[in-house]
């Protein structure tokens, strides 16, 4: 017997309501304590309603992550068009990455904390964003701004640096109190620490 205060819903609106409730819940309890039952409660629907759209909690987390990757890719792509030169574009996309993490920490958590095959980070939902980074590395190599090493590995190294800043920032492990200060540091890191070849190690 369902509670009488459950919200009526249109089928086409249910998925979006569940996604919004999921994002809110991730922000409060994190990915590890995330449950479909609590998402349903927050969305005001029966505990069976999420199964109309999602097979289990992992599938719902995956949908939140996919939302995040789409927005991240768009932000990085736009950032790369606002400057000229592949090295400047790499720095701009790195800054956009950190900015995204600060704006969407719940999505960022779903993207990188939920259980997933490591290959999915660069070949699955995140493949488009990572592919942009690889192409920028290759563009830098073509004009002599980076060594002609493995573009994929160079992209991984630079991604790791930017991701580390983003992760530390949303965990409040950096000595900066405002998003503006974090972004200023991220810009500094992009200017001083961008890995351009094997000699940097």
Image (cartoon, rainbow, N blue to C red):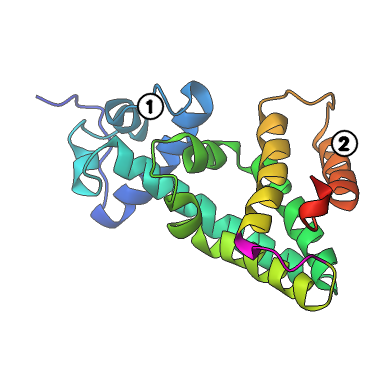
| Image quadrant in which the N terminus is located | top left
Q: Is residue 74 above or below residue 190?
A: below
- Identify the magenta region: 146-152
- The location of residue 7, given as percent across then percent down, is 28, 37
Is 135 contained in the magenta span? Answer: no
Residue hosting label 1: 34
- The location of residue 127, given as percent across then percent down, is 50, 61
Q: Main secondary structure of the magenta part?
A: loop
Q: Secondary structure at mark 2?
A: helix
Of residues 186 and 178, the one nearer the viewer is: 186
Q: Is residue 196 left or right of residue 68?
A: right
Mark with earlier residue (2, 1): 1
Q: Is residue 194 visible?
A: no
Residue 181 numbered tag: 2
| Residue furthest to the bottom | 142
- The location of residue 16, given as percent across then percent down, is 38, 50
Of residues 132 and 99, the one nearer the viewer is: 132
Q: Quarter of the image holding residue 170? A: top right
């Amino acid at each position: 017997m369902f509670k009488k205060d459950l919200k009526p819903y249109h089928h086409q609106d249910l998925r979006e309501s569940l996604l919004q409730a999921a994002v809110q819940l991730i922000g409060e309890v994190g990915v590890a304590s995330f449950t479909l039952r609590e998402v349903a409660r927050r969305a005001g629907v029966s505990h069976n309603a999420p199964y109309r759209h999602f097979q289990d909690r992992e599938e719902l987390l995956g949908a939140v992550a996919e939302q995040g990757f789409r927005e991240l890719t768009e932000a990085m792509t736009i950032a790369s068009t606002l400057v000229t030169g592949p090295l400047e574009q790499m720095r701009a996309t790195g800054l956009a990455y950190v900015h995204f993490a600060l704006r969407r920490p719940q999505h960022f958590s779903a993207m990188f904390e939920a259980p997933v095959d490591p290959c999915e980070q660069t070949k699955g939902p995140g493949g488009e964003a990572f592919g942009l980074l690889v192409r920028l590395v290759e563009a830098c190599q073509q004009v002599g701004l980076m060594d002609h090493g493995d573009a994929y590995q160079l992209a991984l190294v630079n991604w790791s640096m930017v991701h580390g800043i983003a992760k530390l920032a949303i965990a409040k492990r950096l000595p900066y109190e405002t998003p503006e200060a974090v972004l200023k540091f991220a810009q500094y890191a992009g200017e001083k620490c961008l890995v351009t070849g094997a000699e940097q190690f």
